[in-house]
Amino acid sequence: MKTFIALFRGINVGGNNVLPMKELKTLLEASSCRNVKTYIQSGNVVFESENPPENVGRLIREEYGFEPQILFLEKSEFLSLVSGNPYRASKGNQIHFYFCQETPGPNTKKLEDLKSETERYLIKGKVLYIYAPDGIGRSKLAANLEKHLGVAATGRNLNTVNKLIKMLDNA
């Protein structure tokens, strides 16, 4: 058995694409996942399985009427991506990880134009790390990020990432 992290994109945001975590857990268990644990309503899941369950998106579409993008990462890959974080902050909501489905292309110059004076970012492999001390909600860099990266991405702040690491330690 391998340990995986599933990062669901765009669920339970603003009353759209509602998927209760209890029901998501049941769906994953029905797809041969074991020791399924969820964290907050935005779709953070740790589980054990031989392989990521490829049918989950389809099952959600059939049951709830939408099919979320899901990024599955093996434990070692997740920990490796997290360890590449170049930033330190006193608050975990100042650092954000945008996990990408694919490595962003080289044409990301627009990001430099959009970042504020206080923001920093680094693309390393399949992750865009952002340090946003003034808040991600005000960040022009974070707005329409996927458009500028050219790949699908899902963001998590350092607080959530640290919670997932703790969940992995207990898996």
Image (tube, helix red, strand yellow):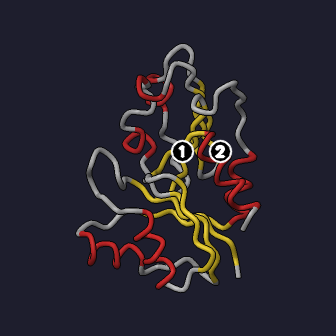
Along the viewing direction, whichever of 33 and 111 lies nearer the viewer = 33
Amino acid under label 1? Arg
Residue at image coords 49%, 37%: 108
Residue bearing mark 1: 156
Judge left or right: residue 117 versus residue 9: right
Judge left or right: residue 92 versus residue 144: right
Q: How many marks?
A: 2
Residue at image coords 49%, 22%: 115
| Nearest to viewer (mark 1 / mark 2) | 1
Q: Quadrant of residue 85?
A: top right
Residue 97 percent coordinates (x, y)? 58, 42
Residue at the left extreme?
Answer: 65
Residue at image coords 56%, 40%: 157
Residue at image coords 45%, 43%: 149
Residue 52 percent coordinates (x, y)? 55, 77
Q: Secondary structure at mark 1?
A: strand
In the rendered view, tell whether residue 1 sits above or below residue 7: below
Q: Quadrant of residue 9?
A: bottom left
Mark 1: give few (<14), some (14-19) or many (20+) Cα within 10 Å.
Answer: some
Q: CA separation, marks 1 and 2? A: 16 Å
Residue at the top extreme?
Answer: 117
The N terminus lies in quadrant: bottom right
The circle drawn on residue 97 is none
Q: Quadrant of residue 8?
A: bottom left
Judge left or right: residue 120 versus residue 153: right
Amino acid under label 2? Lys
Residue bearing mark 2: 124
Residue 42 percent coordinates (x, y)? 44, 52
